[in-house]
Amino acid sequence: MAVMTRFRLTDEDMLDLFDEQLPSLLERRPELETRIYHAFMKTFATKPEVAAILAELREHRSEFHEFRADVNQRFDQVDQRFEQVDQRFEQVDQRFEQVDQRFEQVDQRFTL
């Protein structure tokens, strides 16, 4: 019966393992590539999973662009309404100015 001892690898040991020892092992034993690949795939996303995420991101981007265009259109409509209100206030201001001038004319007639 073999006794297994556990030991911890440092970050540097792990980097050496991935950069140097793993490629060397795969050169010597190419049949292990599938086994190692599947071991890593338990941790990492697959190409189809990444593709699905990218598709969702593209869809969200498209929806966001539509939303932004809609918001911009609404802001343009609000701006137009503000311009209309501003024109109405300008007209009211002109009318008040006319009324004020009439009062001044009437006031001048009575003060003579």
Image (tube, rainbow, N blue to C red):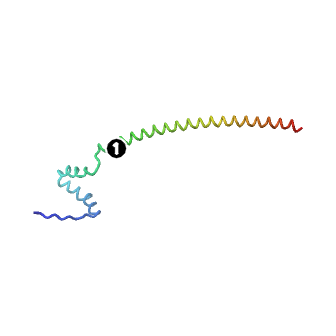
Taking depth in this image into account, of 36 and 95 the one nearest to the observer is 95
| Residue depicted at 34% across the width and 43% down the height | 53
**Amino acid beneath label 1:** Ile
To which quarter of the image does residue 58 belong? top left
Residue, far right? 112
Taking depth in this image into account, of 52 and 109 the one nearest to the observer is 109
User: x%, y% of residue 11?
Assistant: 29, 62
| Residue depicted at 14% across the width and 64% down the height | 3
Taking depth in this image into account, of 36 and 20 the one nearest to the observer is 36
- Would you name the residue on which mark 1 appears? 53
Mark 1 crowd level (few <14, some 14–19, many ≥20, 10 Å Cα) = few
Quarter occupied by the N terminus: bottom left
Residue, far left? 1
| Residue depicted at 27% across the width and 64% down the height | 10
User: x%, y% of residue 91?
Assistant: 69, 34
Quarter occupied by the C terminus: top right
Q: Is residue 11 left or right of residue 33?
A: right
Residue, far front? 110
- Determine whether 62 is above or below 4 in the image: above
- The kind of secondary structure element at disc 1 is helix
To which quarter of the image does residue 65 belong? top left
- Determine whether 2 is above or below 30 in the image: below
Q: Is residue 65 left or right of residue 48?
A: right
